[in-house]
Amino acid sequence: MKTYDISSWIAEKARRAPDKVAIRFEGRETRYGQFEDRIAHLSGAFADTLGIEQGDRIAFLGDNCPEILELLFACARTGAILVPLNIRMTTEQLGVFLNNAKPRYLFVCANHFDSAEACLQQYPSMRLIGIGDDTHSEQDKSDMRALVTAATPLDHDRRFPPSTPVLMIYTSGTTGLPKGALISQEALYHSALNSIGVFEMVRHDEVLTAVPMYHIAGLSIHSVPAMLAGATVTIHREFDAGDVLRDIERLRVTVLLARPVVSRAISSHSDWENTDISSLRTLGTGGTGVPLASMAPWFARGIPVQQLYGLTEAMPPVIAVPIEDARRKAGSIGKPSAHVESRIVDRWMRDVEPGERGEIALRGKCVFSEYWANPEATEQNFRDGWFMTGDVGHIDDDGYFYIDDRIKDIVIVGGSNIYPADGERILAECEAIEEAAIVGRPDPELGESIVACVVLKEGYAMTSKELRALFVGRLAVYQHPHHVAFMDSLPRTGLGKIEKSTLRTMVRGDLPLDAAYAKPKQVRR
């Protein structure tokens, strides 16, 4: 039977290039030989001291740090499953995930120990293990450093079937049964191959990770693939635009990942113009709609911006724009990566013609296997062996994919499908608007009416009539917003995405609609 273990990547690099820097973090460097040594000792602690067996879940709660990679590869070597938890979640929300995953141990960074101990009230059978200094618990005084120091190393000699789960990441939201996407060693391997191909990654690359590693993006898009390529990853504990610019210049970073909100923060920083970013070969970006305005400052400085597509269940980049087409195909999410099949289909699973809208369907070894303890959700999201993403898109004549909207976000006005993303692109171009989202609201005559939820930039004023005028000549009249809600901020999920389910609830309630609004400061028009 074919077997596999992704920790072999590190063992191989340690044998061939033990002195090559694998990870930089807060002033210290870990070389591949040292990294393998830590993984071997941690794996030994898993197997002997902690008694962890194949299939056991190991949770992680903390900021970005090298330990999350050590835990991942130790899980791979012992057959355990790493469950990263979102540090932005409340204790109550974390408790929902913990009760679903039922981890034996929770590895927690010092500054999140209070939250972790509060979680024990909901899930008392779990044991806490501290990461870093000043971590202690009345229930368990273990810490990761002591475990690694005392353990007998476990060499790379255990192998598992490729389908063995190694990672479980929860999708956004806590309504109903939590959905933890189970990701196998084989899936993580083929996802890494996709990334290496898309970013043209080699061992000489300097990769910078400043986006959250508890999320699939910060962990699997380039941090883990860099380990397969033998490159160097610099990890920032948390995002700071000034620190990112400093390290791009100081370390000659070649590969960077940044969501639109992050890339805007970097390009609008006071140090932007004076920082040498010429070492960057590419900036990867993605998420729910990437405004061209967020790409423009990078293009202006000669940096290719590659738009990527993927989900927790199908790790990005399953679809991506090649580096050489970054500017020519700006706005597209690209072409399918090497180790995935991608289609756009109608409701009968027939391929649609170029320019026609349909649902994006994916199949391949980089796609997740199932939702943890949730067979109903697994069955609902697969059709004829294809994972149905819920994303509406189309293909152009060159075979490039485009995202149009989420199926669940479509507003049905008088029997016609309205795609909010069409209007959101128009709002994103307005100088006065900081951010915006469009949702539906029940309407006795139309079925649903369109509501534009808008946050203005400081110093700007606007009326609902002025806002609706932005759509004249751009979209058909029936696609224009019927109402406008000016807001101070938009609700977001723990991963920073605009939470449209909350917006829909708000616009159905007592949220003021169609009132003129001005942000504080000197008002400009």
Image (cartoon, grey):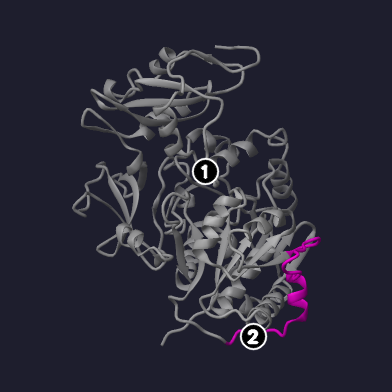
266 with respect to 371 (left or right): right
Point out which mark residue 274 bears.
none
Look at discs 2 and 1 and give the one toward the viewer: 1
Q: Say which quarter of the image contains residue 75.
A: bottom right
Q: Is residue 151 magenta?
A: yes
Report how far apart the C-alphas of labels 2 and 1 lie in the structure. 40 Å
- Residues in magenta, as a range: 131-157
Q: What percent of the width, then of the height, locates residue 239?
A: 67, 46
Q: Is residue 29 above or below residue 439?
A: below
Identify which amino acid the numbered label 1 is placed on.
Thr
| Earlier-in-chain disc, 2 versus 1 | 2
Residue at 66 percent across and 58 percent down: it is 116
Please state, as top left, top right, bottom left or bottom right, where the N terminus lies in the image: bottom left
Main SS of residues in magenta: loop
Residue 18 in view, yes or no: yes
Q: What percent of the width, then of the height, locates residue 94?
A: 57, 54
173 with respect to 153 (left or right): left
Identify which amino acid the numbered label 2 is placed on.
Asp
Point out which mark residue 493 bears.
1
Point out which mark residue 155 bears.
2
Q: How many marks?
A: 2
Q: Is residue 484 magenta?
A: no
Residue at 61 percent across and 79 percent down: it is 12
Residue at 67 percent across and 45 percent down: it is 277
| Crowd rating for badge 2 (residues with CA inside 10 Å; few <14, some 14–19, many 20+) | some
Under circle 1, the secondary element is loop
Under circle 2, the secondary element is loop
